[in-house]
Amino acid sequence: MDNTRVYKMSFAGVYPLYVNKVERKGRTKAEVDEIIFWLTGYNDESLQQLISDRPDFETFFAEAPKMNTNVGKITGVICGYRVENIEDPVMQKVRYLDKLIEELAKGKAMEKILRK
C-alpha cells in the first residue's frame, strides 16, 4: 500500500467522488456529511472550510476535532485490506472513511453505518 500517495491526496479532491458514488446509488450528500461529522467531529462549517483549504488526508485527520470513540467497531474489508488490521494510523482512518462510504453506497441503514 503506497501510503505517501494517499496521504498527499487532497480531501477536497476525493470528497466529490464520495458524494457521486453514493448519489448514483440513491443516497445523499447530507448522508456523506453525516458520516464525516460522526467519524471526525467536523461540522458543516468546518467541512466547508476544509473543502476550500484543500488539505491532504494526513492533515484532514490530524486536525479532526475528535475521532469517534466507536471507530473500533468499524470492521471488514475495503480495498483488499481488513480495516481493523491496518497498522498505519492515518491509512487506517482513510480506510475507515472509505468503508463507511462503501456501506452507505451499498444501502446500509445509517444507524448501522454509525454503529448505533
Image: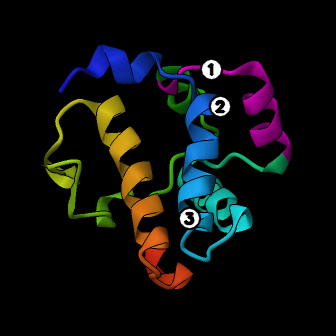
Which residue is found at the position 80% from the left and 25% from the top?
52
Which residue is found at the position 60% from the left and 30% from the top?
13
Residue type, label 1:
Pro
What residue is disc 2 on? 12
- Indicate whether 13 appears above or below 115: above
Is 3 placed left or right of 25 in the picture? left
Q: Label 1, label 2: how many angstroms apart (C-alpha)?
A: 7 Å
Among the 4 quarters of the image, the one containing residue 86: top left
- Indicate whether 77 appears above or below 94: below
Residue type, label 2:
Ala
Among the 4 quarters of the image, the one containing residue 95: top left
Quadrant that contains the N terminus: top left
Which residue is most to the right?
45
**Residues marked 1 and 2 touching at CB (< 8 Å):** yes
Q: Label 3, label 1: how many angstroms apart (C-alpha)?
A: 22 Å
The answer to whether one can see residue 84 in this image is yes
User: Quick one: label 3 or label 1, which is nearer the N terminus?
Assistant: 3
- Indicate whether 62 appears above or below 97: above
User: Quick one: label 1 or label 2, which is nearer the N terminus?
Assistant: 2
User: Quick one: label 3 or label 2, which is nearer the N terminus?
Assistant: 2
What range is drawn magenta here? Answer: 45-57
Tell me the number on the disc at residue 55.
1
> Was residue 11 drawn as part of the magenta stretch in this picture?
no
